Amino acid sequence: QVQLVESGGGLVQAGGSLRLSCAASERTFGSYAMGWFRQAPGKEREFLAAISRNSLGTYYADSVKGRFTISRDNAKNTVYLQMNSLRPEDTAAYFCAASTTYLMGLVLQQSSLYRYWGQGTQVTVSS
């Protein structure tokens, strides 16, 4: 079973940047597609970005395209989410997730494809 631990959240002013990290417990990290999601209070969980096993495919929600960048380092068992130009509406708990699917493309926005989830890290953007 893969354990995922997010870090890097915090309080930032609008227009600022944060980089989230998600460390996986397994050496087979490279066999998982990875995704980032977020959930604000009272709202449904929202897909943000996904990356294929070998980093050749990256996919983004329209709400973060051009501002957020997903990347991974399989040697470090870690996936990242670089977040720039943050807005107050980006305030949420951010979660990483691992999927064993071999599907590619924006189908990876489906949370049901992800088997393992981290506990989340809070991001708060002040205006």
Image (cartoon, rainbow, N blue to C red):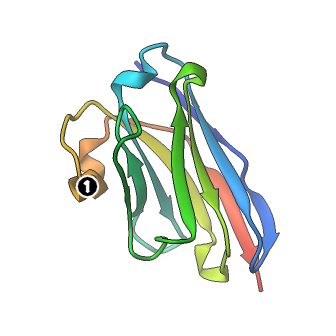
Dividing the picture into quadrants, the one containing residue 13 is bottom right
> Callout 1, which amino acid?
Gln
Residue 76, compared with residue 50, is above or below; it is above
Residue count near mark 1 (Cα–Cα under 10 Å), binned few <14, some 14–19, many ≥20: few
**What residue did someone put label 1 on?**
110
Q: Residue furthest front?
A: 56
Q: Is residue 127 left or right of residue 53?
A: right
Q: Is residue 64 left or right of residue 62?
A: right
Q: For the point 60% across and 23% down, which residue is it?
A: 76
- Horizontal and vertical percent for residue 19? 69, 52
- Horizontal and vertical percent for residue 35? 41, 47
Q: For the point 22% across and 46% down, which residue is it?
A: 104
- Horizontal and vertical percent for residue 43? 44, 73
Q: For the point 39% across and 75% down, which residue is it?
A: 62
Q: Is residue 47 left or right of residue 13?
A: left
Residue 74, compared with residue 18, is above or below; it is above
Q: Secondary structure at mark 1?
A: loop
Q: Residue furthest bottom?
A: 127
- Horizontal and vertical percent for residue 55? 41, 39
Dividing the picture into quadrants, the one containing residue 80 is top right
Q: Residue furthest top?
A: 27
